[in-house]
Amino acid sequence: MYLIVLVLNKTEYLREVLKAFTELGIKGATILDSIGAGRMRNLDGHYIPLVGGLMRVLENGYPHNRTIFSVVESKEIALKAADRIEEIVGDLTVPGTGIFFFVPVEFFRGGALGHYLNQKNEPTEDGSVS
């Protein structure tokens, strides 16, 4: 299993990315509002302290992004997700587009994927695993 993480700067593509995840068989995702530290430092040409300025940034509607993360079953799905994301939002090496990465997961329990895997591995009436 792998944890995929997408920091999506082009938030107008959020629904399309989530639709692509569903099409790839990704069972669920968590979406957080986020803002990069570089944006915090450069807003309006003034340095804003990271903690103290966070509420002001959120209240004033400064540009933000979405951080999406999900656990997927295989490296193949993670790579397919990366390809689909770039088809939707464009080249991630272009600044201001976003960041995508994935890392192996050593332990996992819960969520939609966990429920799916538990059902998939439950013994059937004849004792075999489905």
Image (cartoon, rainbow, N blue to C red):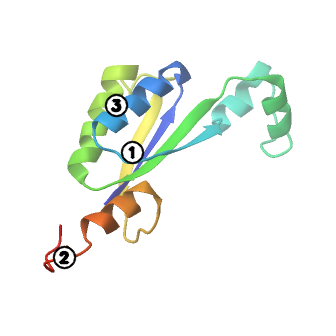
Residue that numbered label 3 is attached to: 20
User: Badge 1: how crowded within 10 Å, few (<14), some, or many (20+)?
Assistant: some
Instruction: Measuring from the top left, give residue 58's x and y in whole percent.
Output: 79, 32
Q: CA distance from mark 1 to mark 2?
A: 41 Å
Query: Image check: 102 left or right of 95?
Result: left
Q: CA distance from mark 3 to mark 2?
A: 35 Å
Numbered circle sitting on residue 101: 1
Marks 1 and 3, the one that precedes in the sequence: 3
Instruction: Measuring from the top left, give residue 86's x and y in whole percent.
Output: 33, 26
CB atoms of marks 1 and 2 within 8 Å: no
Q: Residue at x 39, y 27 (%)?
A: 92
Label 1 element class: strand
Quarter-wise, where is residue 22 in the image? Answer: top left
Query: Image check: 23 left or right of 107?
Result: left
Identify which residue, 119 or 37, lies in the foreground.
Answer: 119
What amino acid type should be assigned to the residue bearing mark 3? Answer: Ala
Numbered circle sitting on residue 125: 2
Identify which residue, 38 or 26, lies in the foreground.
Answer: 26
Disc 1 or disc 3, which is closer to the eye?
Answer: 3
Q: Residue at x 65, y 28 (%)?
A: 64
Query: Image check: 55 left or right of 102?
Result: right
